[in-house]
Image (tube, coloured by chain):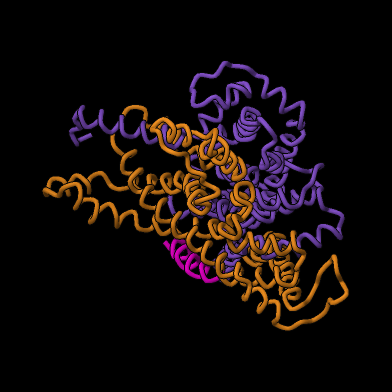
Amino acid sequence: MARAVTTQHKVIATGAAWIVALLIFFPILYTIITSFKSEQEAIQGFALIPSGTFESYTEVQAQSGYFKFFFNSVLLSVGSTILALIVAVPAAWSMAFSPGKWTKDILMWMLSTKMMPAVAVLFPIYLIFRDAGLLDSRIGLMVMLMLINLPIVIWMLYTYFREIPGEILEAARMDGATLWGEIVYVLTPMAVPGIASTMLLNIILAWNEAFWTIRLTTTEAAPLTAFISSFSSPQGLFWAKLSAASTLAIAPILIMGWFSQKQLVRGLTFGAVK
Amino acid sequence: MATQQTRSLARFMMAPSVVLLFVWMIVPLVITLWFSFQQYNPLNPVRDGFVGFSNYALFYSNPAFLQSILNTLVLVGSVLLITVIGGILLALLIDQPMWGQGIVRILVISPFFVMPPVAALVWKNMIMHPQYGVFADIARFFGAQPIDWFGQHPMTAIIIIVAWQWLPFATLILLTALQSLDGEQKEAAEMDGAGFVSRFIYLTLPHMSRAITVVILIQTIFLLSVYAEILVTTNGGPGYASTNLPFLVYQKALLEFKIGQASAGGVIAVILANIVAFFAMRAVGKNLDK
């Protein structure tokens, strides 16, 4: 590093950044802290040290069956992601490796479907789901989440696939590789990292989707977003329980998110910022 | 021969996603459009039938309509302002040499991974609650009267919550752009005697301009359809004080069962989104060429 960084400068930057970062993180931190308090403790004013009880967690599970919702969330986010990949990988692949005259327009059009406000089609979707008997069904919601995120998945895969050099394909062909051999032995190993990061981001997006998952479910297929929304009208003393439920709902995806920051930037900006 | 074969294979591989997305876009939209010209009430089907543009007239003359459009724009505008300016400042701060930069990044990005209902409920009950919230504790500590955020300043409260959710996104993307700035250029500018401010205006800001555009456009898409945050905090109230367009459409459709009017509102929402989308597509499309 050519620029001389004075220690004083570094100390000030460190202090300021940590203060701001902790302020931003505070609502999450305080929720985690409160989840280890008893209900009485939780309303006794500001305190950063909890007594360390797990009673809120056991109560949340006993009262509302957290694990059923958790299971639904896992099933819906992973299931919809796999469905999306099955449809999107061939599409992104063909657009990246044999682009035609319309490839760019098709990509733009796909992205434009993402901009349709969900609420505008709420009632038609509701009717279709009702008549098909899909209300509160995991399969129906899985397909729904797949469709919502499909444009982002295709785009992300496309930007990754495009970086695979075409010369490698030519070389393989010269060596007499068949199309099948080309896909299995040459392209797949190079595409796996891109597919993995796409998967990660899509699971996060599907896990946090909070419009259709709330509106199209009642009990059977309801994931954590619906579970948490049931806390919106307070029932007596519920601060510690709310904290425990919130912590449980966000912890898995928060940890996943920490590992996928880079992919997040790329995926959500459709490759525009890397 | 080989190219012909590849080309038809390419079409075959693309077909499922194109067909799926086409059906997913067109079918519900056509149904919405159809309902927007119908009187349709599942609870009272006697007067159902074609009514021309009267749903639009009714939706438009509803005092809640203008309020909801205004709230939608205020929400989008304020959150954009806070997150873009805050995001630039934060990105500049985090980009400085410091100890524990990785942990700072993780702490700052975290709110983005919190699902909207959790974010809203945590702010509503843990932070802004007029009796048990942290803000109330702070107010009482200074001997002031705690503020009833959702009763008195519902829009401000929702703006704070949504801005908290999106500030990390803006920061992360702007930071990524900032870190791709060529170090040598920075050094050259420094050697030429450019101070921090002029370096920021003439070098850093132009470099970040595309990232800023992308942040604004992507956030706008999501901010136009904020829903869960309103549902679990104010439920659109008091009155219509914090009702945005998506929330009004939801109320009309699933609470009042005025499907025709709700569909007319939905069509208006689509038009609004398309105006934004038009600019968004152009900006994103440019990046395809490079």
Residue under the point 13% across and 45% down: B191
Relative placement, left or right, of B183 versus B174 is left
Question: Residue B277 lies in magenta, yes or no?
Answer: yes
Residue under the point 67% across and 52% down: A211
Q: Is residue A68 visible?
A: yes
| Residue B256 vs residue B283, the one in the foreground | B256
Please identify which colour was used for chain A in the image: purple
Relative placement, left or right, of A127 versus A2 is right
Q: Is residue A176 visible?
A: no
Q: Residue furthest bottom?
A: B52
Please identify which colour was used for chain B in the image: orange
Question: Residue B260 lies in magenta, yes or no?
Answer: no
Residue A154 position within the rendered picture, expressed as x and y whole percent measured from the top left: 60, 55
Residue A222 position within the rendered picture, expressed as x and y whole percent measured from the top left: 76, 43
Look at the magenta stretch and give its main secondary structure. helix
Residue under the point 71% across and 28% down: A60
Residue A203 position within the rendered picture, expressed as x and y whole percent measured from the top left: 63, 42
| Image-quadrant location for residue A191 | top right
**Quick check: B221 above or below A189?**
below
Residue B22 position within the rendered picture, expressed as x and y whole percent measured from the top left: 69, 67
- Quadrant assignment for the N terminus of chain A: top left
Residue numbers of the magenta segment: B274-290
| Residue A53 vs residue B215, the one in the foreground | A53
